Image: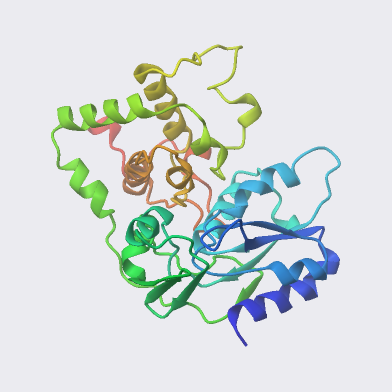
Amino acid sequence: MSVLQELKEQIRAALPELDMVLGWEQGFDALHMRPLFIRTEKDLERLVLNPLCVHSLATYLPGLLRGAGNDKKVGLVVKGCDSRAVIQLVQEKLIPRDRVVMFGFGCNGIVSLQKLEAGAQGCTGIGSVEFAGDKVVLSAPDTKVELPFAEIRSGKCETCRYHNAIDADHFAGARVEEGTVPAKHPTLEEFEKLPLSERFAFWQEQMRRCVRCYACRNTCPMCVCRDHCIATSRNPHWLTQESSTAENFMFQMIHVMHLTGRCVECGECERACPLDIPLMLLRRSMNGVVRELFAYESGTDPDATPPLLTYQVEEETINERGW
């Protein structure tokens, strides 16, 4: 039985007790998937599962499960990084764990559409995408293009240590072997070698390009206060709507600070950005600080308390009195 078929059977058995299950279905063309809201067995026929299923469906959970008198129970198809987002939301008491059912599977990485489209130049009108081992075959009316999967895999997958869904209620297929990966992403490691002046100049240029569309915020599973976001609040009025380098910098700095110790490195912010701004450089940098100071990695231990949601008089790794 294939992973997809096993997953469908698991969802079919659980569906009578759930209001809906979130998965993925075919989008507007062969390269794009979109979220699928499964409410009936008939909807299951549209469920797909492949490396093009890039969206983190955990983003929907706070909106579906919060509110007075809300007793919905929702299922969610999750890969490793998606399950981390669910765990982090539960740890922060933003959603109730007993009303979420996770259908997990093992993930060998997802596709970067930017890399795929760059590698498939000249192949127009792609009608189908086939994943065959370590190869991806794109078929168009007049041609076929074969690409190594490693070359079009999303950058976030290069240092992912959680290929299998964590704390899943159901698990489809075999578990993926967790390989050893560098603690620090190669891109971040290279960036941090640059002089401070060059790094600042780099970010000034990136913030100059930002159009403040808020796609990075809207797609982030941990950004749960969109109706009261500091970027759009008028009372207090912290930021203007001006899309200037200074205002954009201020928004992104606030954004990354609000995600410190919470970001699960799902990469949704960077994937959604229409200007291809490398936002994960900021997130990975702050996550590294949290790992170093508190030995904590967000969304990996359902029983842990996030370090910024608790207080200790003395932190083992912070020697304030010795300065």
Q: Where is residue 191 drawn, in percent x and y? A: 21, 43
Asked if residue 40 can be seen in this view, the reply is yes
Q: Where is residue 21 drawn, in percent x and y? A: 73, 61
What residue sits 40% from the left and 28% below the top? Answer: 210
| Towards the viewer: 200 or 242 | 242
| Towards the viewer: 52 or 18 | 52
Residue 147 in the figure: left or right of residue 67: left
- Quadrant in the rendering for residue 135: bottom left
Instruction: Say which quadrant the C terminus sits in.
Output: top left
In this figure, which colouring scheme has been used for the structure? rainbow
Asked if residue 76 can be seen in this view, the reply is no
Residue extending farthest to the front is 142
| Towards the viewer: 62 or 213 | 213
Residue 88 in the figure: left or right of residue 15: left
- Quadrant in the rendering for residue 184: bottom left
What residue sits 61% from the left and 31% below the top? Answer: 226
Residue 165 in the figure: left or right of residue 314: right
Residue extending farthest to the bottom is 1
What residue sits 81% from the left and 70% below the top? Answer: 41
Instruction: Say which quadrant the N terminus sits in.
Output: bottom right
What residue sits 57% from the left and 45% below the top? Answer: 221
Residue 318 in the figure: left or right of residue 50: left
Q: Where is residue 294 drawn, in percent x and y? A: 38, 46
In the rendered image of this protein, does residue 97 appear above or below residue 307?
A: below
| Towards the viewer: 113 or 77 | 113
